[in-house]
Amino acid sequence: MDGGTTGGEIWNAFGNGYIPHNVVIDGDGVVLYSQSGFSLAGIVAAIEDGLSYLEVDTDSDGILDENDNCPEDYNPTQADTDEDGVGDACDPCNNLVWTSGDLNANLTLDIADVLILVNILIEGNGPQCQIEAADMNSDNLVNVLDVIVIVQYILSGTEGQALRYLEENFDYIPMNTIEL
């Protein structure tokens, strides 16, 4: 250990003549912690610091967790049919079944869907998948306007016709509204 080329250069790397007992080095070879003696708190803090800036891809789909819409489920395409920020691979509401207005998930818009929506509004809550499918006018609210839109679709009308009819014939009547 002479400080030359025989391995002695490590002798002074961590202080004058001492090789520490505790060293934490990050993935880039940077020393995060170096201290003699035992300090569990210091070691844990250094390890947590090192882990805090690691780039993580839990599901190994090539998308880092911070940008992944399903960080625990493999989904390299990041498909999100209903654009709710939750990828199809982990979305509890199957958007191929829970489509706009189809609150009983039978793939048909009918009076049963209207009755389910009215019941949700009266009670002020309901299953999340039904509430998401009930937002017929995409305003992130579920209210009486969505009932009118479903009825218009069933009667082969349009959303615009439904809204014009409401505006022309009714004053606003407060009713339960559920924000998405």
Image: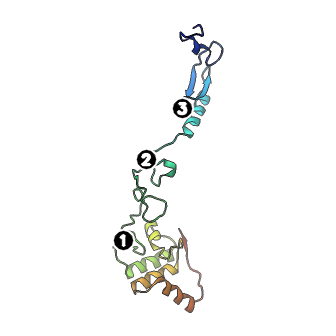
Residue depicted at 43% across the width and 67% down the height: 129
The residue to which callout 2 is attached is: 62
Foreground of the two, 97 or 126: 97
Amino acid type at mark 3: Asp
Q: Earlier in the sequence, mark 1 or mark 2?
A: 2
- CA distance separating discs 1 and 3: 52 Å
Q: Are marks 1 and 2 in contact (CB under 8 Å)?
A: no
Residue depicted at 51% across the width and 42% down the height: 55
Residue depicted at 59% across the width and 32% down the height: 46
Q: Earlier in the sequence, mark 3 or mark 2?
A: 3
Q: Position of residue 61 (x, y in %)?
A: 41, 48
Q: Are marks 1 and 3 in contact (CB under 8 Å)?
A: no
Mark toward the viewer: 1 or 3: 3
Marking on residue 151: none
- CA distance separating discs 1 and 2: 33 Å
Q: Quadrant of the N terminus?
A: top right
* Residue 131 relative to residue 43: left or right: left
Q: Earlier in the sequence, mark 1 or mark 3?
A: 3
Amino acid type at mark 1: Ala
Amino acid type at mark 2: Gly
Element under disc 2: loop
The residue to which callout 3 is attached is: 28
Q: Position of residue 26 (x, y in %)?
A: 54, 31
Element under disc 3: loop
Q: Residues within 10 Å of mark 2 (few under 14, many from 20)?
A: some
Instruction: Report the colour scheme.
Output: rainbow
Residue depicted at 60% across the width and 10% down the height: 3
Element under disc 1: loop
The residue to which callout 1 is attached is: 105
Mark toward the viewer: 1 or 2: 2
